[in-house]
Amino acid sequence: MKKIITILLIAFFTNNLSAQDNKGNLLLEGSLLGSWTEIAISGNNIGYYISDNFALSTGYVMGLWESDLVNMNVGGRYHLSDNFLAYTDIYIDSDEYGDVSISSLDLGVKTRYYATKWMSIEPGVGILVTNILDGDNTFLITKLGFSLHFSKN
């Protein structure tokens, strides 16, 4: 039993399944973010690889409990290797008058662990800068995301 667990752990952490980061492929991402009282669905993005290793993405953030947070984001994903990528997201929101502003910027890196050829788990670390226009607050953040990868073939 010890051997099986050891082999599974080694396979999970060192697998090198074919990365789905080629031009024309589609990416769906999702993660949860926030404290237990203000959980938000964050990073729910759809991305498109405009070239090998580089995807543009767009998505939304929506508060679930005790939060009225709703905003959109645009971003990019650049693959430094098959399992390691850098990401950035710019969050855009609007007020009750319809005025649009950039609310925050998220920069960081993630590691992809492929559970299957088309699904990965993505732990990551980054820097979140909030209130960009009104004086910024900078936070070190950790993430746990999940992605689905769709090949054009």
Image: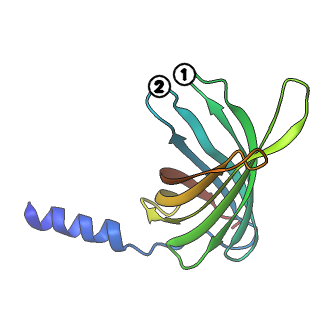
Q: Nearer the viewer, residue 2 or 139?
A: 139
Amino acid on which the number 2 mark rests in the picture: Thr
Q: Earlier in the sequence, mark 2 or mark 1?
A: 2
Q: Quadrant of residue 1?
A: bottom left
| Rendered view: 140 above or below 63 | below
The numbered disc on residue 65 is 1
Q: Is residue 8 left or right of residue 68?
A: left
Quarter of the image where the C terminus is located: bottom right
Amino acid on which the number 1 mark rests in the picture: Trp
Q: Residues within 10 Å of mark 2 (few under 14, many from 20)?
A: few
The image's colouring method is: rainbow
Looking at the rendered structure, the secondary structure element under dot 1 is loop
Instruction: Name the outermost residue toward the front.
Output: 135
Q: Quadrant of residue 3?
A: bottom left
Q: What residue does disc 2 label?
A: 37
Question: How far across and down, in percent of the image, does residue 132 sit?
Answer: 74, 50
Q: Nearer the viewer, residue 13 or 134?
A: 134
Residue in view at x 50 percent, y 53 percent = 141
Are the residues at dot 2 and dot 1 in contact (C-beta closer than 8 Å)?
yes
